[in-house]
Image (tube, rainbow, N blue to C red):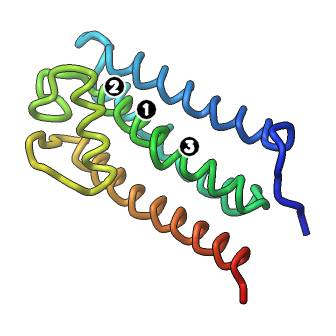
């Protein structure tokens, strides 16, 4: 059985991984949501969307099979749930472009990010509406939100019960 990390040195690789995820997702969102209308469109949006689905599936597999320590798994899943996945979906929406090509009512990168968080958490205010291929992407984001939330809650409960057995 693995011993849980207790010092900063023992958390170093996990923190580096988390910071890497945050930085990569921020730059993906920043770059892709600012594409010119000539560069953005269905082709680049579809490519980015496929890459996003592969990334989410690989990260989910990695958390569940390769990260053996529950504290680290919970931390990395929390970072993904709160920041990384919504930013990457916002980047994919941005890759489709503005002018109501993807999300009706989105006029700026921050609008895509807002729409992504609202979709990921399945709040669905209805002030912005996905259109075209982005409808499927929005469904995938909502399902991803459900799955990651379920994994996060399961990991939290498992960690709690492990340390609070009576």
Name the residue beneath numbered marker 2.
95
Mark 2 in CB contact with mark 1 (< 8 angstroms): yes
Name the residue beneath numbered marker 1.
47
Q: Is residue 107 left or right of residue 67?
A: left
Pick the quarter of the image with the N terminus: bottom right
From what the image shows, is residue 124 above or below residue 86?
Answer: below
Q: CA distance from mark 3 to mark 1?
A: 12 Å
Q: Quadrant of residue 105?
A: top left
Circle 1: element type = helix
Q: CA distance from mark 2 to mark 1?
A: 9 Å
Horizontal and vertical percent for residue 150?
47, 68
Horizontal and vertical percent for residue 145?
39, 56
Of the residues under marks 3 and 1, which one precedes in the sequence? 1
**Observer-nearest of 50 and 7:** 7
Horizontal and vertical percent for residue 122?
27, 57
Mark 1 burial class by Cα count in 10 Å: few <14, some 14-19, many 20+: few
């Amino acid at each position: 059985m693995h011993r849980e990390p207790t010092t900063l040195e023992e958390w170093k690789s996990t923190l580096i991984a988390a910071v890497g995820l945050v930085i990569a997702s921020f730059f993906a969102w920043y770059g892709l949501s600012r594409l010119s209308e000539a560069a953005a469109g269905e082709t680049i949006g579809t490519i980015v969307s496929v890459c996003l689905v592969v990334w989410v599936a690989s990260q989910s597999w990695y958390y569940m099979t390769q990260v053996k320590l529950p504290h680290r798994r919970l931390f990395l899943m929390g970072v993904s749930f709160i920041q990384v996945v919504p930013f990457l979906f916002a980047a994919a929406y941005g890759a489709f472009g503005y002018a109501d090509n993807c999300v009706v009512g989105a006029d700026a990168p921050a609008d895509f990010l807002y729409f992504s968080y609202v979709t990921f958490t399945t709040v669905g205010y209805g002030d912005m509406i996905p259109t075209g291929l982005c409808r499927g992407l929005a469904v995938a984001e909502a399902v991803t939100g459900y799955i990651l939330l379920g994994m996060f809650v399961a990991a939290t409960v498992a960690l709690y019960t492990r340390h609070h057995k009576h």
